[in-house]
Image (cartoon, coloured by chain):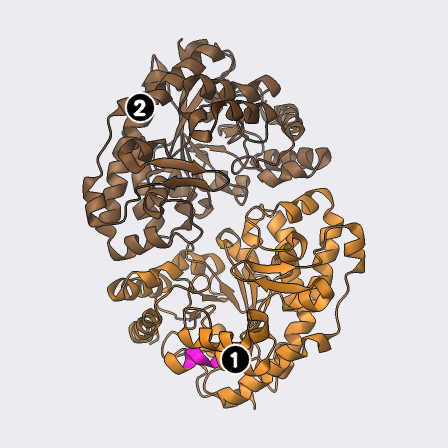
Chain colours: A brown, B orange
Amino acid sequence: MSPASTENSVFLRSLLREPVPYTPVWLMRQAGRYLPEYNATRARAGSFLGLAKNPDYACEVTLQPLDRFALDAAILFSDILTVPDAMGLGLSFEQGEGPRFAHPIRTEQDVARLAVPDMESLRYVFDAVSLIRRQLAGRVPLIGFAGSPFTVSCYMVEGKGSDDYRLIKTMMYSRPDLLHRILDVTAQTTAAYLNAQIDAGAQAVMIFDSWGGVLADGLFQEFSLTYTQRVISALQREREGQRIPVIAFTKGGGQWLESIADAGCDAVGVDWTVNLAAARRRVQDRVAFQGNMDPMALFGGEDAIRAEARRVLDAFGPVGKGGHVFNLGHGISQFSPPDAVAVLVDEVHRYSRQFHV
Amino acid sequence: MSPASTENSVFLRSLLREPVPYTPVWLMRQAGRYLPEYNATRARAGSFLGLAKNPDYACEVTLQPLDRFALDAAILFSDILTVPDAMGLGLSFEQGEGPRFAHPIRTEQDVARLAVPDMESLRYVFDAVSLIRRQLAGRVPLIGFAGSPFTVSCYMVEGKGSDDYRLIKTMMYSRPDLLHRILDVTAQTTAAYLNAQIDAGAQAVMIFDSWGGVLADGLFQEFSLTYTQRVISALQREREGQRIPVIAFTKGGGQWLESIADAGCDAVGVDWTVNLAAARRRVQDRVAFQGNMDPMALFGGEDAIRAEARRVLDAFGPVGKGGHVFNLGHGISQFSPPDAVAVLVDEVHRYSRQFHV
């Protein structure tokens, strides 16, 4: 199926700062635990990895939120840690514990052994992309994604989630050469991975730098943004005559918007601490923005959700030569009431039309 | 003892942007678990609260880091949660679990019952301040502190630490009137508390807004900064003819430096994501800055510690009409090697002289 045949291209055109009738909206982690139908599929799959590694299940949960809500894009159901799993680190998810790697990368020997894996080991992801594209049948565009090299490397070195990033930062400060090699291999792998998703049918790709914001100024640029940029520059940006937009999202990256915007992406994803009016001025609409309502606003009840959606849209203001894709500033909470999403999507679609004239 | 008799006033003068021979340095949480002598005293005290509520123990641990390192300031050993404890919320620290309140503030009734407590219930803090001042005998100045009303309220509503702030944000979005009342009572209490610390001998005060940075732009200003500002404006700023400088620290506040600087403080504390050169330009040296090395840099070994210290000092540059107090960008990790602090203090004192000419 050619991207040109997508019926609803408001999302893709917004990323490219082309005129659209309203502000499109999708939500990070929109296929997830806040939906009972997701939990039912996950129960059938037996585990999170069983879900992510089975293209039929991955397709099923990817489409679930689209059947409930008038969202303007689908995003592949997967996990950013498929990449190091393919590198042989042995990914598992303990119940209620988050991800764990059996073989974290800590020593010079560990680092020396790292290599770009054969993309065949990630075939299940590309199969899911193809299947989802077929099943979507052009309703909305499909987003592919990967973690940023730095974010993925955090898990590779720490071996699991962390609240102080002590192990990777100890490596960064004491043996920067080792971390640079991990990042280099991960960046090469990530570029190949995203290109294969695009080959399989992804119509836009997003790079999640969830943890770049924990780095000091200067070191964010050296250890995170440089490698995100390297991934972006290695991506195919056109496929079957259609531009493939790239979104770079950095949680906690509000102070570095100018340099993120200059990393080669079409759109910058921002968290809720960013003022969108100031952000547009700072990058002079050279890129589109994606964001940025606080996911916790979905707990405030209908009036608060509508008010917060309007606050985000008002901050961006008349879209003009810019581009705005509405999203949360981070993934939707598993505790969110599903009805809140319906309210949000309705308000964004309704209220934003005045800004597209 | 009059503040004027303090032998080493480099810290106080830096906060007031007066000329000094070198950049002063102290570390957030410098009296803490990374020091074996602290752990020994805590063991004798039986618990964290036993330590914090006993002026003799609090004095002992406050002075410990000064006996090891050439630090330029002492900070009262206490906890930001003494304030809601005095409000009757029932503070405890479970082993390895962090703080917990027996009576968190969740309902309209809870909020209605909140009141500014009698400062006599915090007498143990003021006694500790007086004792520490006597024991310091003018070696270095003593800093008093409190949490920001928003940060303290996070714990009051959540009842413990949180990683998504769901309860307080649900209240903020759905019943902002309730949260405003909690913040109002907490701000009044905090102002009285800091003024009593100043009466007891604190020579500078710091307000820790550890969690303001989790708020959306716009809501940070409304729910956090407004109340920090209210505390600052209620503080006595001179005592025995000496100016009492105020430091406002907001973790994750790098995007809001201008408005924090305008909140009435003498110095803005910043985390390691902030570029100090850009920060100075943004506020045009109207305030001093305190910060901002990544606490994790202390794990990098001597060369890395010295290099990172120089990077922070170089970013600030020639001090001129500005003011710089060196610190970490957040509290020192309990896992830090104590020797790393000696290296850091040495490098800051040595390398910074060139910037004070």
Q: Secondary structure at mark 1?
A: strand
The disc numbered 1 marks a residue on which chain? B
**Closest to the observer: A52 or A43?**
A43
Residue marked by disc 2? A195
Q: Residue type at mark 1: give it.
A: Leu
Residue marked by disc 1? B142
Q: Secondary structure at mark 2?
A: helix
Q: Residue A41: x percent and y percent?
A: 53, 22
Location of residue B224 by image quarter: bottom right
Is residue B298 located in the magenta-colored stretch of the structure? no
Q: Residue at x 24, y 54 (%)?
A: A175
What is the CA distance from the residue labelled 2 to the residue labelled 1?
A: 58 Å
Location of residue B321 by image quarter: bottom left
Q: Residue B73: x percent and y percent?
A: 46, 78
Q: Residue A292: x percent and y percent?
A: 54, 37
Q: Residue at x 31, y 56 (%)?
A: A170
Q: Residue type at mark 2: give it.
A: Asn
Tell me where the magenta segment starts and ends, as one range. B62-66
Which mark is on residue B96? Answer: none
**Closest to the observer: A330 or A277?**
A330
Q: Residue A207: x percent and y percent?
A: 39, 33
Q: Is residue A137 visible?
A: yes
The disc numbered 2 marks a residue on which chain? A
Q: Are there few (<14), some (14-19), or many (20+) residues within 10 Å of tag 1?
A: many
Q: Residue at x 71, y 33 (%)?
A: A302
**Closest to the observer: B100 or A319?**
B100
